[in-house]
């Protein structure tokens, strides 16, 4: 089994992906544009999220601007479906704390992730650069929504308690 590690600083927008101590990729989110740019082992991809209530993310090959597939999300922020040409891959959290998640298809688990909002690891048998980045992107997407909901709910409560 192969292992990659990732790190992201507090209030930073870029995940740095390492193989041992060598930087092999990045995933940089553009919060205001609802997009992210990813690169792993020289392959570049863009993730462009569209919609408001029922969001969907288009996956694009950065060099050719060719659409490769899309990500659809479930309402409970616990699952997602990745469609790439004739393949369907599923993303899900593997524990209640949302610190472990995986990508799998009809043949079983392909990629396993473990981490927090600052660092983690990715384990896989055969490397698929696009799927490695997509699994990290989906988790980041759900973490951003969770933070936005938290702020929207608790800031009004906190400010009203000051009066």
Image: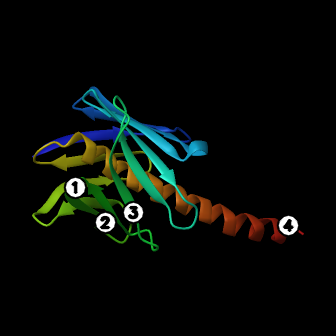
Mark toward the start of the polypeptide (1 vs 4) = 1
If you read the primary sequence from the N terminus, does the residue marked by circle 3 or circle 2 appear first?
3
What whole-number distance in Å separates the C-alpha atoms at marks 3 and 1? 19 Å
Of badges 1 and 4, nearer the viewer stands: 1
The 10 Å Cα crowd at callout 3, few under 14, some 14 to 19, many 20 or more, is some
Q: To which residue does mark 2 refer?
A: 92
Residue behind mark 1:
112
Instruction: Report helix, strand or loop for mark 3.
Output: strand
Q: Which mark is residue 72?
A: 3
Query: Would you identify the image quadrant in which residue 150 lies?
Result: bottom right
Q: Which residue is at a point 44% across and 50% down the rendered structure image?
A: 117
Judged left or right of residue 150, residue 77 is left
Mark 4 Cα-neighbour bin, 10 Å: few <14, some 14–19, many ≥20:
few
Mark 2 or mark 1: which comes first in sequence? 2
Separation of residues labelled 4 and 3 (CA atoms): 40 Å
Query: What residue is disc 4 on?
Result: 162
Report if residue 116 is visible in the image: no
In the image, residue 20 sits, relative to residue 31, either above or below, namely above
Which marked residue is nearer to the observer: mark 3 or mark 2? Answer: 3
Residue 37, percent across and down?
43, 36
SS of the residue under disc 4: loop
Q: Label 1: state its secondary structure.
A: strand
Q: Residues within 10 Å of mark 1 (few under 14, many from 20)?
A: many
Front in this rendered view, residue 11 or 26: 26
**3D distance between C-alphas at marks 3 and 2:** 12 Å
Q: Nearer the viewer, residue 30 or 150?
A: 30
Percent position of residue 113, x then y? 27, 53
N-terminal of the two: label 3 or label 1?
A: 3
Please tell me which residue is depicted at 40% across the width and 55% down the height of the picture: 139
Quarter of the picture holding the C terminus = bottom right
């Amino acid at each position: 089994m192969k292992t990659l590690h990732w790190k992201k600083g507090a209030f930073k927008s870029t995940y740095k992906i390492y193989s041992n101590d060598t930087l092999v990729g990045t995933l940089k989110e553009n919060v205001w544009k609802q997009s992210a740019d990813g690169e792993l082992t020289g392959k570049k991809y863009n993730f462009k999220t569209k919609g408001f209530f029922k969001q969907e993310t288009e996956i694009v090959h950065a060099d050719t601007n060719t659409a490769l597939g899309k990500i659809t999300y479930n309402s409970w922020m616990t699952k997602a479906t990745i469609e790439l040409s004739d393949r369907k891959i599923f993303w899900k959290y593997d524990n209640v704390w949302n610190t472990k998640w995986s990508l799998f298809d009809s043949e079983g688990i392909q990629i396993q992730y473990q981490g927090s909002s600052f660092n983690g690891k990715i384990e896989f048998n055969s490397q698929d650069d696009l799927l490695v980045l997509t699994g990290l992107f989906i988790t980041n997407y759900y973490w951003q929504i969770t933070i936005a909901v938290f702020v929207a709910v608790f800031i009004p409560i906190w400010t009203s308690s000051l009066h």
